[in-house]
């Protein structure tokens, strides 16, 4: 048994003209591996930062328009999509590093803790740099994303007083084209609403108000306007809640914050 | 090229590996050095038939040759080579499972020279050990074979199986316990 196995192996190597793969091939493979792992970590960090952004700055106060209790609304509107993103990318990273050269010697629990710490650090960076806000805002134009995000989709409920879309100013009239391409004429009989400064042509906005009844046209009475971006409901900054934003003198729309605080 | 065998026998595995990159004849010396060790390892761990073992060893050495430049000098050559053989064996086991071939048909411990009565006792003992090994979970069987038949230390087992040393210790303890429990059955 195994007689002349060495000769058989050498013959096979020579017959098939096999050569040792080059060192640079393995270096390249390792680089690709770590790039892929870093990408997974970056995505996990970004998902965590957006999840945190939504938890901190989502429109959690709109539950009463939807006839829901705060608890039930929280359960429905929790950013599960982003939580799933964090988990999927973190798990992918851990699967890849579990048996990798240089990491397999460390217990899986240590690898998980270190991976989580890196994700939290990355998430802080994304949040502070405004990357999470940019990501969430750019994704919010996508219908599927809005469907997966209960707070975003809640703004497509004009009959419940919540409307969102792109503003167009035509002949001194404010027209809002919602995501179903329906045009709404925005009206304010007493010109008394929060967030007037947000009425900028071609900007996406969110409106709290009500449909004007007995009107032949699609008319919507404005009570409050909010920026489309996730953040302070008046200036979309991310320093804190509306009142914190006002107290710190960081809100670029002080009057709106003040009016909000006075309510 | 002629190789002076007396000189070569003093060369470490790592030196032979380095020389294999320049001359394939040195690689055959590595094969000679390890083929029997791998044969018994595969016999004990996977219980393949002899022809299957030869295939697994051949494929493993081809893989070792192609990956010579990927050898990590921080490891022992034997740990690295055992890892490749182990992975090949796992692939073969999976292939056999997919094709519904019987597993562990010939698990055996090689004979040593003994007198007739001793031989009989040893044979009976071996049968019990083999039956017990066969009943263990694959993870436990492989770790016991590496530790108690291949005499690998914990660090080497950790490098071969790509598991942390702590996990290796725990698994050896659990495997020993499971082995003991199952072995009692045959002693009774």
Image (cartoon, rainbow, N blue to C red):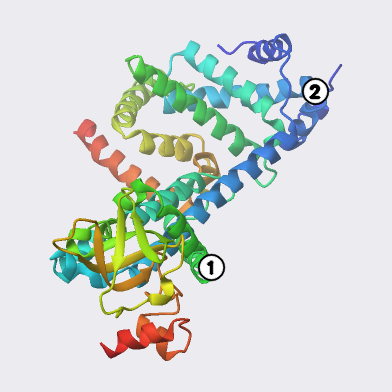
**Quadrant position of the C terminus of chain A in the picture:** bottom left
**Percent position of residue A179, x then y:** 33, 51
Q: Evaluate whether residue A71 shows in this view.
A: yes
Please name whichever residue, B13 or B101, is drawn nearer the observer in this view of the structure.
Answer: B101
Residue A234 showing in the rendered view: no
**Mark 2 residue element:** helix
Q: How many tags in the picture? A: 2
Relative to B123, is A196 above or below?
below
- Name the residue nearer the viewer: A4 or A177: A177
Residue ID at (56%, 31%): B84
The image quadrant that residue A83 belongs to is bottom left
A221 relative to B37, above or below: below
Alpha-carbon neighbours of circle 2 within 10 Å: few (<14), some, or many (≥20)? Answer: few
**Mark 2 — residue?**
B5
Q: Which quadrant of the figure contains the N terminus of chain A?
A: top right
Residue B19's disc is: none
Q: Position of residue A238 (x, y in %)?
A: 45, 75
Q: Which residue is mark 1?
A: A125
């Amino acid at each position: 048994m195994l007689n002349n196995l060495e000769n058989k192996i050498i013959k096979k190597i020579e017959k098939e003209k096999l050569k040792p793969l080059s060192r640079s091939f393995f270096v390249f493979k390792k680089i690709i591996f770590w790039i892929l792992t870093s990408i997974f970590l970056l995505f996990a960090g970004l998902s965590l930062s957006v999840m945190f952004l939504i938890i901190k700055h989502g429109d959690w106060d709109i539950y009463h328009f939807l006839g829901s209790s705060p608890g039930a609304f929280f359960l429905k509107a929790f950013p599960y999509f982003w939580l799933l993103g964090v988990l999927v990318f973190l798990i992918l990273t851990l699967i890849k590093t579990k048996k990798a050269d240089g990491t397999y010697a460390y217990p899986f629990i240590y690898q998980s803790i270190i991976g989580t710490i890196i994700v939290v650090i990355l998430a802080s960076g994304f949040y502070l740099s405004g990357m999470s806000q940019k990501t969430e805002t750019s994704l919010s134009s996508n219908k599927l994303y809005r469907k997966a995000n209960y707070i975003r989709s809640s703004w497509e409920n004009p009959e419940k007083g919540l409307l969102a879309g792109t503003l167009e100013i035509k002949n001194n009239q404010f027209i809002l084209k919602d995501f179903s391409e329906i045009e709404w004429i925005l009206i304010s009989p007493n010109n008394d609403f929060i967030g007037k400064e947000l009425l900028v042509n071609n900007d996406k906005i969110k409106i709290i108000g009500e449909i004007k009844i007995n009107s032949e046209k699609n008319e919507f009475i404005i009570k409050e306007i909010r920026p489309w971006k996730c953040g302070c409901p008046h200036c979309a900054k991310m320093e804190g809640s509306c009142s914190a934003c006002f107290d710190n003198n960081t809100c670029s729309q002080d009057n709106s914050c003040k009016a909000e605080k006075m309510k | 090229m002629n190789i002076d065998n007396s000189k070569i026998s003093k060369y470490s595995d790592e030196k032979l590996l380095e020389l294999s990159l320049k001359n394939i004849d040195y690689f055959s010396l590595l094969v000679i050095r390890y083929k029997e060790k791998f044969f018994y390892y595969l016999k004990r761990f996977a219980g393949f038939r002899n022809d299957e073992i030869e295939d697994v060893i051949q494929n493993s050495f081809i893989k070792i040759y192609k990956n010579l430049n990927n050898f990590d000098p921080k490891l022992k050559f034997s740990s690295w080579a055992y890892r490749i053989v182990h992975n090949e064996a796992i692939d073969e086991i999976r292939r056999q499972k997919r094709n519904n071939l019987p597993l562990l048909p010939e698990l055996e411990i090689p004979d040593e020279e003994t007198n007739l009565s001793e031989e009989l006792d040893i044979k009976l003992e071996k049968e019990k050990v083999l039956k017990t090994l066969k009943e263990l979970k694959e993870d436990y069987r492989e770790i016991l074979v590496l530790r108690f038949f291949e005499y690998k230390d914990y660090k080497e087992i950790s490098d071969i199986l790509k598991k942390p040393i702590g996990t290796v210790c725990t698994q050896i303890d659990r495997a020993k316990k499971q082995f003991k429990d199952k072995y009692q059955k045959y002693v009774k």
